[in-house]
Amino acid sequence: MSLPAINQEYLIDFLVKLLNIASPTGFAEPAIAFVEQELSEFNQLQFARTRKGALIVKWDPSTRGANQPQSGRDMQSNLPPIALTAHVDTLGAVVKEIKSNGRLRLSRIGGVEWPTVETEGVWILASNGQKLRGSILVDTASGHIFGQDMKKTPREDDHMEVRLDVRTLSDKETRDLGIRIGDCVAFDPRVEVTNGFVRSRFLDDKACVANIVSAIKSMVDAGLSPSRTVYFHISNYEEVGHGASSGIPAEVAELLTVDMAVVGPGQESDEFSVTLCIKDGGGVYHEGMTKKMRLLAEQHSIPYKTDVYRYYASDGEAFWRAGGDVAVALIGPGIDASHNYERTHTDGLVATTNWIMAYLLSD
Ligand SMILES: [Zn+2]
């Protein structure tokens, strides 16, 4: 069977909205709520949260939407349920210290490297509900004071600070603004869409969440259901390594992890294709499921690459390490300059969405 058409405008529009919602790990609830709200339009789906705050969306093909016609496929299936996971949490930081000059020292969340966010705009999402603006600078920022020495300052936690765009010159004045140790610091994503390219921070892994949402919408719009019960696990703790270690139901036989592919020197992946990861820093994926994914891609003429990633681990492996007994495979669109100022292309997003649909419709 051929795959339903993808509404690319919807896909990009949803992705841009999601990218613009701040959701560092530990503070990802607004992004989780946004995905739930978007999918709640489809009455085929059932929603639950884990205690950790992940969103679990169940699509049982025997539950038909109000206006969905009966088709040959959406009968009760004997096939065991499957699951897909993608994460909305991102890199970020929390306030670690308030310095005597009123500026903030940060503690990083996930694998942020300081040179990738130096001079970036930030929001301090204070625990009292206030939002305060600022930017990240090295503590030797002024070229007219430090000259060439500015280049020599190590970009390490002790030398990076947030300069607040509020009047404060002391620890006390900053505390009086309501800022507390542990408050969330979100980096500006700086989203731009040009010539089919999407340039933004945190395409890892919001691009893949958009792929899943777009796949569901395309199938529902075409009156199609998956061939078996599917659980979509929208993860909120991936960037710290344990996102999908819980929340995947025990009866699930296969877990398709949808997360970014690595683009750059030495990699096969590119921004215009979807990649099947064979091995990453956490080990090798499931051979049988990997074969199944290759066959589906070939059957549907989906442009895909196979690749090996170095400094990378996925939520599929998190579930394996937690004792999950499932086959796991990993696919995702190519993302250039990952964990930096990232970029991908609509073609890679479309290829990923098509592969997700091919998988959901397969026996
Ligand atoms: Zn990721």
Image: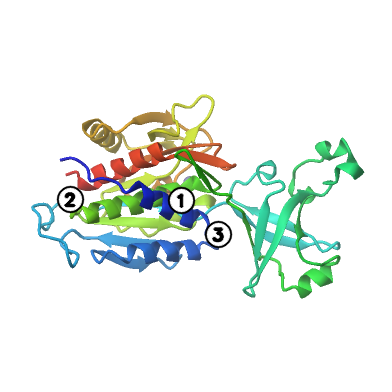
Residue 352 spot, x, y in % from top left: 35, 41
Q: Secondary structure at mark 3?
A: loop
Q: Which residue in the protein does label 2 denote?
A: 227
Residue type marked 1 = Lys
Separation of marks 3 and 1 at Cα, in angstroms: 11 Å
Confirm or reject: label 3 Cβ below 8 Å from ligand 1: no
Q: Earlier in the sequence, mark 3 or mark 2?
A: 3
Q: Which residue in the protein does label 3 denote?
A: 22
Q: Earlier in the sequence, mark 1 or mark 2?
A: 1
Residue type marked 3 = Ala
Q: Secondary structure at mark 1?
A: helix
The part of the image, by quadrant, that contains residue 317 is: top left
Depth check, front residue: 193 or 136: 193
Residue type marked 2 = Ser
Q: Residue at x 72, y 52 (%)?
A: 136
Q: Residue at x 28, y 38 (%)?
A: 289
Separation of marks 1 and 2 at Cα, in angstroms: 26 Å
Residue 220 spot, x, y in % from top left: 23, 56
Left or right, residue 286 beside residue 19:
left
* Residue 54 visible in this rendered orientation of the protein: no
Quadrant position of the N terminus in the picture: top left
Residue 180 spot, x, y in % from top left: 71, 69
Residue 267 spot, x, y in % from top left: 48, 27
Q: In the figure, 29 relative to 323: above or below? A: below
Q: Mark 3 against mark 2, which lies toward the viewer?
A: 3
Q: Which residue in the protein does label 1 denote?
A: 206
Q: Secondary structure at mark 2?
A: loop
* Residue 208 visible in this rendered orientation of the protein: yes
Dot 1 alpha-carbon crowd within 10 angstroms: few under 14, some 14 to 19, many 20 or more? many
Separation of marks 3 and 2 at Cα, in angstroms: 35 Å
